[in-house]
Image (cartoon, rainbow, N blue to C red):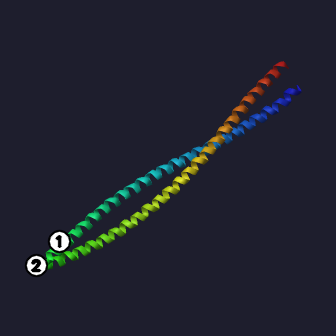
Amino acid sequence: MVLASKAKPCVCARSGQLARERSRLLKAEKCVNQAINRLVRREEALDLLEEQVSNQERELLVADDLTRKEELSAAADWEASKVASETSREKQLSLASREQSLDEIGKGLQERRRLVQGCSERVESKRRELDEEQVAQSKLRCEIGREEKAAQQAETTLEALDHESNHLMQQLLETSTLL
């Protein structure tokens, strides 16, 4: 009779401990799921950001090619206007007009270069942000790994406690049947 009364509080204590352990595991699992969801959202945002940066880089390359072509065209026009100025006075007036348009093109090219430089700086800034996000993502993955290990350890402990509880219950039933 004495053995039965001592064993019962132990089973109750184990049962309470198992309930607390289950509650802790559920909370840990919830935290892990939230971290995974945050990670997925960040990865999607990073993918979108990468796509935007790639699009901007392509646009900058196209703009740079256009600028080069316009520079080459302007240089060719300049040479053609020089030759034309040597042949006649009429062509000299035409050359003056072309020079003025070339100056405007040069100013346009300078403005485009300034815009391209600004875009390049923004792209570099986006790259730095992307690098920072990747570092944060790596830290989150480590944190998730630790949480998963803790959850696995808690699950192992819970299984051991369940097994021990079942064993104690069986012993209690055997003791009860003997009495």
The residue labelled by disc 2 is: 88
- On screen, residue 144 above or below 91: above
Query: Relative to residue 10, is residue 28 drawn left or right?
Result: left
At horizontal 65% and vertical 38% (from top left) the residue drawn is 152
Extreme-bottom residue of the structure: 89
Extreme-top residue of the structure: 178
Q: Position of residue 71 (x, y in %)?
A: 27, 67
- On screen, residue 127 above or below 173: below
Query: Relative to residue 121, is residue 175 drawn left or right?
Result: right
In the structure shown, which secondary structural element does the residue marked by tag 2 occupy? loop
At horizontal 71% and vertical 31% (from top left) the residue drawn is 162
Q: Which mark is residue 135?
A: none
Number of numbered discs: 2
At horizontal 36% and vertical 65% (from top left) the residue drawn is 116
Q: Looking at the image, which is closer to me, 125 or 3?
A: 125
- Quadrant of residue 154 within the rendered picture: top right
Q: Which mark is residue 80?
A: 1
Q: Looking at the image, which is closer to me, 32 or 176?
A: 32
Give the amino acid type for the residue marked by disc 2 in the picture.
Answer: Ser
Q: Position of residue 50 (x, y in %)?
A: 43, 53
Where's the N terminus, which quadrant?
top right
Are discs 1 and 2 less than 8 Å apart at CB? no
Query: Relative to residue 43, is residue 28 drawn left or right?
Result: right
Give the amino acid type for the residue marked by disc 1 in the picture.
Answer: Ala
- On screen, residue 60 above or below 26: below
At horizontal 59% and vertical 47% (from top left) the residue drawn is 142
Q: Position of residue 136 (x, y in %)?
A: 55, 53
- Quadrant of residue 55 within the rendered picture: bottom left
Q: Looking at the image, which is closer to me, 21 or 148?
A: 148
Q: CA distance from mark 1 to mark 2?
A: 13 Å
Q: Position of residue 5 (x, y in %)?
A: 85, 29
